[in-house]
Image: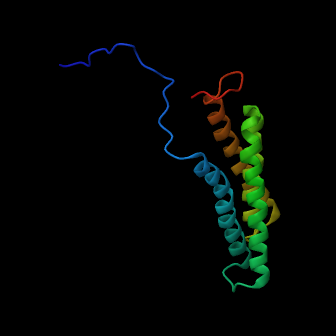
Amino acid sequence: MAQAAPTSGGTRRDVRPPDIFSPQTHLMGRLALPIVTGLIYGYWAASNRRSGGSITGWNLLFGFVTAIVFALVLFGVLTIGPRLRREVHALMWTAFMGVAFGFLYSQSGESVLRSVGMSLAVAAVTFIVMFYRFYTHEDAAGHRVR
């Protein structure tokens, strides 16, 4: 049975894959992600609100206002979040996802209690997932481990 021969120098953990995109491409991606996600969210909220009915001017206005607010809040979460400690960062994502899901769910015509219950369930799962992600990708001082 063959085994791999040891190489000199051991393994290097500080080597990252090459960055094939320019800084301008990264900037456009950082701006495009909240905008595109906001447009999808706004369309989804407007679609839930009209319940399959005809599209009206007020429905379009509601969708675009919802998209703008969602995109601005998401941009804030993506900008401010990495500067926070992992616990607060996870709580920020928890609040954002809980409110965003609760608002979408409430537009479908369900009761307020059901909307709150469902958004709390989504928020709890979001906290568990985000805390685990940040806890496993940072050291004790809060610096990202690469």
> Where in the figure is residue 28, as x and y percent of width and height?
63, 54
Q: Is residue 9 above or below residue 43?
A: above
> Where in the figure is residue 5, as x and y percent of width and height?
26, 16
**In front of the other: 59 or 23:** 23
> Where in the figure is residue 77, as x and y percent of width and height?
75, 47
Q: Is residue 141 above or below residue 34?
A: above
Question: Which part of the image, by quadrant, shows the C terminus?
Answer: top right
Left or right, 107 with reference to 27: right
The answer to which quarter of the image holds residue 117 is bottom right
User: How is the structure coloured here?
Assistant: rainbow
Q: Is residue 102 visible?
A: no
**In front of the other: 31 or 63:** 31
Could you tell me how many numbered marks the image carries?
Answer: 0
**In front of the other: 108 or 87:** 87
Q: Residue at x 74, y 72 (%)?
A: 63
Q: Residue at x 68, y 66 (%)?
A: 39
> Where in the figure is residue 93, as x and y percent of width and height?
73, 45
Q: Is residue 85 visible?
A: yes
Q: Residue at x 67, y 69 (%)?
A: 44
Q: Is residue 6 above or below residue 74?
A: above
Of all residues, the one furthest to the left in this rendering is 1
Of all residues, the one furthest to the right in this rendering is 112
Q: Residue at x 69, y 86 (%)?
A: 54
Question: Which part of the image, by quadrant, shows the N terminus?
Answer: top left
